[in-house]
Image: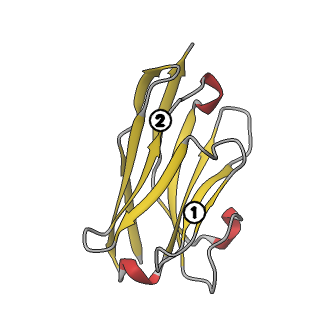
Amino acid sequence: QVQLVESGGGLVEAEGSLRLSCAASGRTFSNYHMGWFRQAPGKEREFVAAISRSVIRTYYADSVTGRFTISRDNAKNTVYLQMNSLKPEDTAAYYCAADNHLIASRDPDMYGYWGQGTQVTVSS
């Protein structure tokens, strides 16, 4: 089992920044690829970013490329999502997730462990 707890969400004005954190506990954090997903009301959960367990590879949704940065600190069992130039359409609940398949994935069905989510609201 891997337990994930997100933090750092909140209300921010457009063009502002937030940094989300996801603290992991349980099994060896460095064995897992980590992803961030988001879900807005009435919409399906969508991929935001992922980082491989080795920190070599990162992946981003087109909608956040150049604005968001995913990183991880395996010594602190934590993954981060730095969000800059936020837009109202970024408003959603943000979830981190852990995946121990061969390669990091954009598919939420590949992730076996999820946090409870943190709300990000961007005002115009």
Q: Is residue 25 above or below residue 68?
A: below
Q: Is residue 10 left or right of residue 122?
A: left
Residue farthest toward the front in the current orientation of the protein: 66
Residue plotted at (60% across, 44% down): 66
Q: Is residue 9 above or below residue 21?
A: above
Q: CA distance from mark 2 to mark 1?
A: 19 Å
Marker count (numbered): 2
User: Do the residues bearing badges 2 and 1 touch, measured as CB atoms within 8 Å?
Assistant: no
Residue plotted at (64% across, 47% down): 65
Residue farthest toward the top in the current orientation of the protein: 124
Q: Is residue 46 above or below residue 86?
A: below
Residue farthest toward the bottom in the current orientation of the protein: 102
Name which residue type carries label 2. Gln
Name which residue type carries label 1. Ala
Residue 124 x/y as whole percent: 57, 12
Residue farthest toward the left in the current orientation of the protein: 76
Q: Nearer the viewer, mark 2 or mark 1?
A: 1
Q: Is residue 61 left or right of residue 97?
A: right
Q: Which residue is mark 1?
A: 50
Residue 77 x/y as whole percent: 31, 69
Residue 20 x/y as whole percent: 40, 45
Mark 2 vs 1, N-terminal side? 1
Q: Which residue is mark 2?
A: 119
